[in-house]
Image: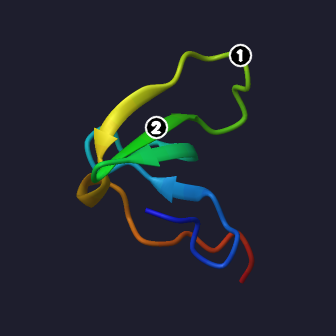
């Protein structure tokens, strides 16, 4: 899974929170909560993330 249009922000459909994609491997994304750079990363299935979040209207 690659960053779509260089935008690493996604919505985690499991938790409902915004996350930053920091890596990916074998269909799983490595994410951490948005705006929490010291938070531990966790693996989630890539299909549990929205494809893209626009922060601009």
Q: Is residue 56 left or right of residue 52?
A: right
**Colour logic:** rainbow
Picture layout, residue 22 above or below residue 56: above
Quadrant of the image occupied by residue 16: top left
Q: Is residue 52 left or right of residue 56?
A: left
Q: Residue at x 26, y 53 (%)?
A: 48
Q: Which mark is residue 53?
A: none
Q: Is disc 2 placed on a helix, strand or loop?
A: strand
Q: Which residue is mark 2?
A: 30
Q: Which residue is mark 1?
A: 38
Residue 12 image point, x, y percent = 38, 48
Q: Is residue 18 left or right of residue 46?
A: right
**Which residue is situated farthest in the bottom direction here?**
57
Q: CA distance from mark 1 to mark 2?
A: 14 Å
Q: Residues within 10 Å of mark 1 (few under 14, many from 20)?
A: few
Q: Residues within 10 Å of mark 2 (few under 14, many from 20)?
A: some
Residue 24 image point, x, y percent = 45, 47
**Which residue is situated farthest in the front direction here?**
26
Q: Nearer the viewer, residue 21 or 52?
A: 21
Picture layout, residue 39 above or below residue 35: above
Residue 21 image point, x, y percent = 55, 47
Q: Residue at x 66, y 79 (%)?
A: 5
Image quarter where the N terminus lies is bottom left
Residue 35 image point, x, y percent = 72, 35
Quadrant of the image occupied by residue 36: top right
């Amino acid at each position: 899974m690659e960053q779509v249009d260089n935008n690493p922000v996604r919505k985690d459909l499991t938790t409902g929170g915004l996350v930053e994609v920091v890596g990916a491997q074998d269909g799983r994304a490595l994410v951490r909560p948005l705006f929490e750079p010291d938070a531990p990363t966790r693996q989630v299935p890539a299909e549990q993330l929205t494809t893209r979040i626009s922060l601009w209207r």
